[in-house]
Image (cartoon, rainbow, N blue to C red):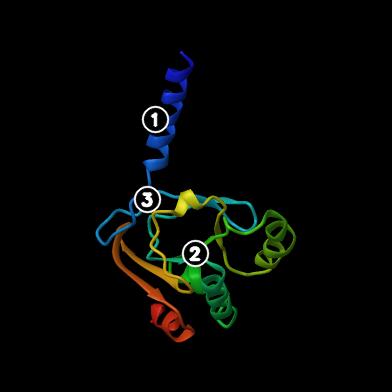
């Protein structure tokens, strides 16, 4: 009986562990995703969103925040852009006492992925912002940008 229970648990974890989200591709529908922002307001990615900017690591986040600091405060909403930051790897104390207070000072919304599994489907590249262009809630183009000049082109 004990061995059957162990086997059942292992099979369950095998199925769950093997269920990895497929990476988003051109032509895919963008999933209906709800995430909290830096003010703990849960927000669903709106259907009219044209661009999703995804920062999967600190370097990408720093690049995007440095760029946005030099722009008009309404750049993202005016252009129907959503910004998602994966903060799942950040230690809790750093998040709570340093990162979130800094994020709350920003005039733009940052959707926060506190659990990496929620955004595992999003393509990523080290030290680059993932730019996902949407049309009618479907993925039209996926690019990665690693300079402020390339980020500026996203909005032109």
- Counting from the top left corner in percent of width and height, residue 86 is at 53, 59
User: Which mark, residue 11?
Assistant: 1
Q: Residue furthest right?
A: 97
Give the residue drawn at x 65%, y 56%. 39
Give the residue drawn at x 53%, y 75%. 64
**Mark 1 and mark 3 residues within 8 Å of each other at the beta carbon:** no
Q: Which residue is disc 2 drawn over? A: 56
- Counting from the top left corner in percent of width and height, residue 50 is at 37, 65
Q: Residue furthest left?
A: 27
Circle 1 or circle 3, nearest the eye: 1
Q: Is residue 57 above or below residue 14?
A: below
Q: Is residue 62 above or below residue 96?
A: below
Element assignment for label 3: loop
CA–CA distance in space, label 1 to label 3 = 28 Å
Element assignment for label 1: helix
Q: Residue furthest front?
A: 3
Q: Which residue is disc 3 drawn over? A: 31
Question: Could you say which quadrant of the image residue 17 lies in?
Answer: top left
CA–CA distance in space, label 2 to label 1 = 31 Å
Element assignment for label 2: loop
Question: How many neighbours does mark 3 have within 10 angstroms: few (below 14), some (14-19), or many (20 or more)?
Answer: few
Q: Left or right of 23: which side holds 111?
A: right
**Which of the two discs, 2 and 1, labels the residue nearer the N terminus?**
1
């Amino acid at each position: 009986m004990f061995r059957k229970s162990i086997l059942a648990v292992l099979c369950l974890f095998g199925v769950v562990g093997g269920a990895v989200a497929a990476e988003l591709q051109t032509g895919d529908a963008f999933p209906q995703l709800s995430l909290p922002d830096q003010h703990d307001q849960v927000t669903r990615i709106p259907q009219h969103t044209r661009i999703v900017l995804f920062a999967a690591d600190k370097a990408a986040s720093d690049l995007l925040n440095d760029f946005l600091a030099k722009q008009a405060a309404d750049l993202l909403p005016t252009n129907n852009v959503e910004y998602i930051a994966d903060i799942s790897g950040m230690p809790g104390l750093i998040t709570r006492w340093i990162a979130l207070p800094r994020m709350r000072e920003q005039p733009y919304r940052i959707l926060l992925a506190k659990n990496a599994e929620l955004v595992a489907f999003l393509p990523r590249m080290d030290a680059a912002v993932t730019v996902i262009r949407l049309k009618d809630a479907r993925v039209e183009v996926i690019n990665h940008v690693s300079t402020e000049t390339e980020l500026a082109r996203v909005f032109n």
